[in-house]
């Protein structure tokens, strides 16, 4: 790890063989775990207190990271609210023997500083001083309204058992190996679970190997505790020309009770791949029930909101329906 500036942290390490997942390269869930760890380091370094993940913005996954690659994850504070820190995070890698560096993904992560009682506390204010810092600050500010629109749309949508689309639920206990530095499950592990559930759902639907190309609006509502029962429910809500849009809800609760609380929600886009790793068309999902139609419209609404974000033109295969 190196500290490039007071508001920036870079983690450097080799991608290990155990980082390789079902895709044959490093899965999106592992990349998201790296993003969360680097952003956490930047947040704690800035606030000098324990911090929790509140939100992970749109992140596109491009070129794969392979075992043995030298990985760099740089997290930079670009804007601060009263207790929140907006952290621009970039993941890149290269062959350690030499060659060009490739940027794989970037996103905005929001952490909140909390005190011993778990309530938000003030953080030092970041004042941009260079043209690049001012541009990054303005970019973060411009996305606040879009993010609020996404969160409101997600909160307003109901999910019931009346849907007919492909759906899977993974259930397990949150184990001590999932613990973060505050004694709870850290956000990166939760995002890894989200990727795994989305993979199972998408692969069952299309009958092919799938991989995440996009995750958006990862909203953390409450902490997930070690020893709690965890449910990760993934449901197909929309298909594009190649992308399968999977809504994922993470719920948890004390095993001594039947109460399960929503902890995290996001929308992940998966694509099917052939033997060469090329994305291939997938069957169009046609909504049947009223629930299906509502979720289909909800997925389109989220895409359109994200498409209005500054500098965020979504790929055609995410926007266009199959057969269009």
Image: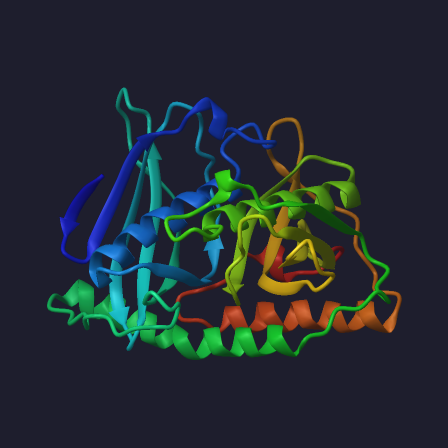
Q: Position of residue 57 (x, y in %)?
A: 45, 62
Quadrant of the frame with the N terminus: top left
Q: Position of residue 294 (x, y in %)?
A: 77, 73
Q: Position of residue 321 (x, y in %)?
A: 71, 60
Q: Up-down: is 214 above or below 279?
A: below
Q: Up-down: is 186 above or below 306?
A: above
| Quarter of the figure with residue 91 | top left
The residue at the far top in this view is: 97
Closer to us: 178 or 294:
178
Whether residue 214 can be seen here: yes
Quadrant of the frame with the C terminus: bottom right
Residue occupying image coordinates x 43% and y 51%: 183
The residue at the far front in this view is: 256
| Quarter of the figure with residue 199 | top right
Q: Is residue 87 left or right of residue 61?
A: left
Q: Position of residue 308 (x, y in %)?
A: 48, 73
Query: What colour scheme does the image use?
Result: rainbow
Q: Is residue 261 left or right of residue 17?
A: right
Whether residue 105 can be seen here: no
Residue occupying image coordinates x 19% and y 58%: 7
Q: Is residue 99 left or right of residue 306?
A: left
Closer to us: 79 or 174:
174
């Amino acid at each position: 790890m190196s500290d490039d500036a007071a508001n920036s942290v870079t983690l450097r390490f080799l991608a290990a063989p155990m980082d390789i997942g079902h895709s044959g390269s490093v899965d999106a869930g592992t990349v998201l775990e790296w993003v969360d760890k680097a952003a956490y380091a930047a947040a704690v370094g800035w606030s000098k207190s324990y911090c929790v993940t509140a939100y992970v913005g749109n992140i596109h996954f491009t070129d794969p990271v392979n075992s043995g690659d030298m990985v760099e994850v740089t997290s930079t504070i670009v804007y601060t609210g009263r207790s929140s820190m907006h952290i621009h995070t970039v993941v890149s890698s290269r062959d350690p023997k030499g060659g060009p560096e490739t940027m794989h993904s970037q996103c905005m992560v929001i952490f909140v500083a909390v005190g011993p009682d778990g309530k938000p506390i003030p953080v030092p204010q970041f004042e941009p001083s260079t043209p690049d810092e001012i541009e990054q600050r303005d970019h973060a500010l411009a996305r606040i309204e879009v993010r609020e629109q996404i969160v409101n749309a997600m909160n307003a949508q109901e999910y019931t058992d009346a849907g007919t689309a492909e759906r899977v639920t993974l259930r397990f206990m949150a184990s001590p190996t999932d613990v973060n530095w505050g004694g709870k499950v850290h956000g990166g592990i939760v995002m890894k679970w989200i990727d795994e559930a989305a993979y199972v759902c998408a692969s069952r639907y299309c009958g092919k190997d799938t991989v995440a190309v996009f995750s958006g609006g990862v909203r953390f509502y409450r902490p997930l505790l070690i020893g709690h029962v965890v449910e990760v429910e993934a449901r197909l809500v929309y298909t594009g020309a190649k992308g399968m849009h999977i809504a994922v809800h993470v719920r948890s609760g004390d095993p001594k009770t039947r109460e399960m609380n929503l902890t995290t929600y996001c929308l992940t886009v998966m694509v099917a791949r052939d033997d060469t790793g090329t994305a291939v068309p997938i069957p169009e999902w046609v909504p049947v029930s009223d629930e299906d139609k509502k979720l289909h419209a909800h997925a389109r609404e989220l895409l359109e909101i994200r498409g209005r974000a500054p500098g965020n033109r979504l790929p055609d295969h995410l926007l266009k329906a199959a057969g269009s």
